Image (cartoon, rainbow, N blue to C red):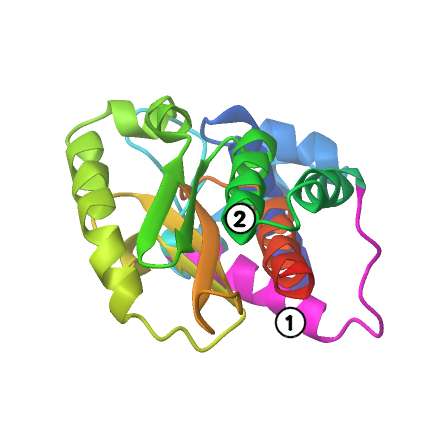
């Protein structure tokens, strides 16, 4: 994949997250300062690679799960090569301030962190607190346009039913784990993405906090916040 194709894929993913609609060549042509024909040509190449697809009812394109995976891997690689951790932004500092007020109670601190993630990402939030799974923000999840179509709402509901037993058995190797759409081990057809961080807490060396939302995510922001929140909870608790 060429550098320009990578940039166009990233732009399609980021624009689609914002507008919740297929992204057209005219919008991208303005963004990149080239002709629509040039963008359309690059879109054909990206489609042939399986990175984007064209919904039947639209001239625009949307990312595929493979496109999202390529983009997320690039974000993880960039994070791994940071010479020093980036300073927390305003959102991360807001989570810290809220959690610190409950630093004497691990359960309240974790709940507070989840509540903050829900507000900041507009996703559903989850965390393990001992043997229990704390979930909040379900309304955020089902208000997303993706889950108004077909049987997506039912498959997401089944994913939520299976989430607690899966987390109890899961041994996630990475501090931050991202399961995109069909990669999701407990909801392959749900069209949902699970972004989850492992952290040590008084309850377990394998406590988890994260969010569930549509595959159409602001991955850079959400991954950064979930990663930071897991690390912060481990430090505080």
Q: Is residue 60 visible?
A: yes
Question: Foreground: 41 or 169?
Answer: 169
Image quarter (top left, top right, bottom left or bottom right) of the N terminus: bottom right
Query: What is the distance, in whole Å, between disc 2 and disc 1 at their CAs?
Result: 28 Å
N-terminal label among 2 and 1: 1
Using the rendered view, name the quadrant where residue 192 is placed.
top left
Q: Secondary structure at mark 1?
A: helix
Vertical placement of residue 146 versus 174, above or below: above
Outermost residue to the front: 104
Vertical placement of residue 87 versus 96, above or below: below
Please report the residue visible at 68 percent of the width from the left and 64 percent of the height from the top.
Answer: 235
Q: Is residue 85 magenta?
A: yes
Residue 62 x, y percent position in the rendering: 43, 39
Please report the residue visible at 36 percent of the width from the left and 38 percent of the height from the top.
Answer: 54
Question: Foreground: 148 or 101?
Answer: 101
- How packed mark 2 is, by other alpha carbons closer than 10 Å (few <14, some 14-19, many 20 or more), is many
Residue 47 x, y percent position in the rendering: 41, 52
- How packed mark 1 is, by other alpha carbons closer than 10 Å (few <14, some 14-19, many 20 or more), is few
- Where does label 1 land, which residue? 77
Using the rendered view, name the quadrant where residue 86 is placed.
bottom right
Instruction: Give the label, 2 or 1, closer to the camera.
Output: 2
Image quarter (top left, top right, bottom left or bottom right) of the C terminus: bottom right
Q: Which mark is residue 147?
A: none
For the magenta stretch, what is the residue range? 66-89
Q: Is residue 62 magenta?
A: no
Q: Is residue 5 visible?
A: no
Q: Is residue 168 left or right of residue 120?
A: left
Magenta segment, prevailing SS (helix, strand or loop): helix
- Where does label 2 land, which residue? 110
Question: Foreground: 191 or 236?
Answer: 236
Residue 233 x, y percent position in the rendering: 62, 57
Residue 130 x, y percent position in the rendering: 38, 59
């Amino acid at each position: 994949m060429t550098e320009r194709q990578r940039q166009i894929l990233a732009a399609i993913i980021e624009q689609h997250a914002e507008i919740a609609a297929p992204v057209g060549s005219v919008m991208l042509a303005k963004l990149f300062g080239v002709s629509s024909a040039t963008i359309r040509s690059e879109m054909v190449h990206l489609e042939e690679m399986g990175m984007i697809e064209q919904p039947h009812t639209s001239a625009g394109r949307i990312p595929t799960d493979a496109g999202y995976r390529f983009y997320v891997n690039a974000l993880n690689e960039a994070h791994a090569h940071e010479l020093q951790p980036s300073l927390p932004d305003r959102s991360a500092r807001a989570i810290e301030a809220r959690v610190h007020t409950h630093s004497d109670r691990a359960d309240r601190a974790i709940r507070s962190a989840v509540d903050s993630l829900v507000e900041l990402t507009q996703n559903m939030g989850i965390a393990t607190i001992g043997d229990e799974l704390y979930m909040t923000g379900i309304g955020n999840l089902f208000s997303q346009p993706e889950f108004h179509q077909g049987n997506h709402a039912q498959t997401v509901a089944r994913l939520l039913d299976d989430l607690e037993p899966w987390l109890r058995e899961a041994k996630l190797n990475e501090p931050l784990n991202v399961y995109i759409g069909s990669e999701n081990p407990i909801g392959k057809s749900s069209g949902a993405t699970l972004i989850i961080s492992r952290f040590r807490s008084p309850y377990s060396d394998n406590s988890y906090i994260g969010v569930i939302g549509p595959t159409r995510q602001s991955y850079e922001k959400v991954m950064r916040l979930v990663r930071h929140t897991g690390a912060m909870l481990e430090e505080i608790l």
